[in-house]
Image (cartoon, helix red, strand yellow):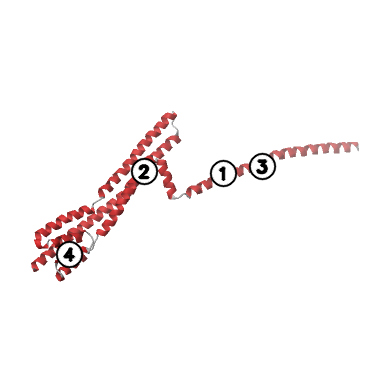
Amino acid sequence: MKKLFALIAVFGVLLFMASNSVVAQDQPATGQAVDTTAAAQVDVAVDQQEAAAATAEEGKSVHSQLKQKFIEGGPIWMTPILMCLVLGLAFAIERVIYLNLATTNTKKLLVKVEEALSNGGIEAAKEVCRNTRGPVASIFYQGLDRSSEGIDVIEKSIVSYGGVQAGLLERGLSWLALFIALAPMLGFLGTVIGMIQAFDAIEAAGDISPTLVAGGIKVALITTVSGLIVAIILQIFYNYFLNKIEGIVSNMEDASISFLDLMVKTNLKK
């Protein structure tokens, strides 16, 4: 009996020690689980912040992004480039309106002038030209105004006034060409000065930092990109104007020849 009680007591002591050991082993595991959960929560919060930042970056308007790039490029150099764009677009809009108003249907105008000459004479034809806009109608009016002085005078008058009208068509294109050349030059100048400032910063720091070099070069190149974009936009308008003016001048020449033929026929009838 005593041996039985002793065995039970030893078994109880061993069971108690085993339970304490299991509890001691479970406590670090529980603490580790808590630490893992906290770390997971921190990661989730960081991910949420990064996602929010990315969403905010994507949600920026084009105006905000352009404003940020303008500030990064430096107002000292970006302002002249912006002025080139504004003034160039102002000249471009004015030329678009003028050239569109200068475009007329020369064949229809010739028919009207011929009918007016047949029915009402020179004064009726001049009235038709006065009521029609465009350089071709103005050239016809000058020829009709000198119809009594002979064909040679009419021809000289048409040629002289045609040169005046061609000059009016090309008015303002020299300024547009200036802004096309000036915008990238200002951009390159800002880039060179920005690079000099970046190298000055490297020299002052005494060490080449990739962040410092990359940031300085990025800011310096913004002015070049801006100048090139401005030049490309204005160059498109410039080429359009050249093509438009070439077409109008060609129509003026053809219409002038037809008008001279008409005046010759009119004088022969007289």
Task: Point out the tag, 4 or 1, that comes first from the N-terminus.
Answer: 1
Q: CA distance from mark 2 to mark 4?
A: 50 Å
Tag 3: amino acid: Val
Give the structural element (helix, strand or loop) at label 1: helix
Task: Point out the tag, 2 or 3, that comes first from the N-terminus.
Answer: 3
Disc 1 + disc 3, Cβ < 8 Å:
no
Tag 2: amino acid: Thr
In front: mark 2 or mark 3?
A: 2
Name which quarter of the figure residue 127 lies in: bottom left
Tag 4: amino acid: Lys
The residue singled out by tag 2 in the image is 79
Name which quarter of the figure residue 178 lies in: top left
Disc 2 + disc 4, Cβ < 8 Å:
no
Residue 45 horizontal/vertical position (percent): 58, 45
In front: mark 4 or mark 1?
A: 4
The residue singled out by tag 1 in the image is 46
Task: Point out the tag, 1 or 3, that comes first from the N-terminus.
Answer: 3
The residue singled out by tag 3 in the image is 34
Q: CA distance from mark 4 to mark 1?
A: 81 Å
Mark 2 crowdedness (10 Å alpha carbons): few <14, some 14-19, many ≥20: few
Give the structural element (helix, strand or loop) at label 4: helix
Mark 3 crowdedness (10 Å alpha carbons): few <14, some 14-19, many ≥20: few
- Quarter holding the N terminus is top right
* Front residue of 21 and 135: 135
Left or right: residue 204 compared with residue 84: right
Q: In this rendering, is residue 257 above or below 33?
A: below
The residue singled out by tag 4 in the image is 126
Give the structural element (helix, strand or loop) at label 2: helix
Task: Point out the tag, 1 or 2, that comes first from the N-terminus.
Answer: 1
Task: Point out the tag, 2 or 4, that comes first from the N-terminus.
Answer: 2
Is residue 23 visible to the viewer in this orientation of the structure?
A: yes
Q: CA distance from mark 1 to mark 2?
A: 39 Å
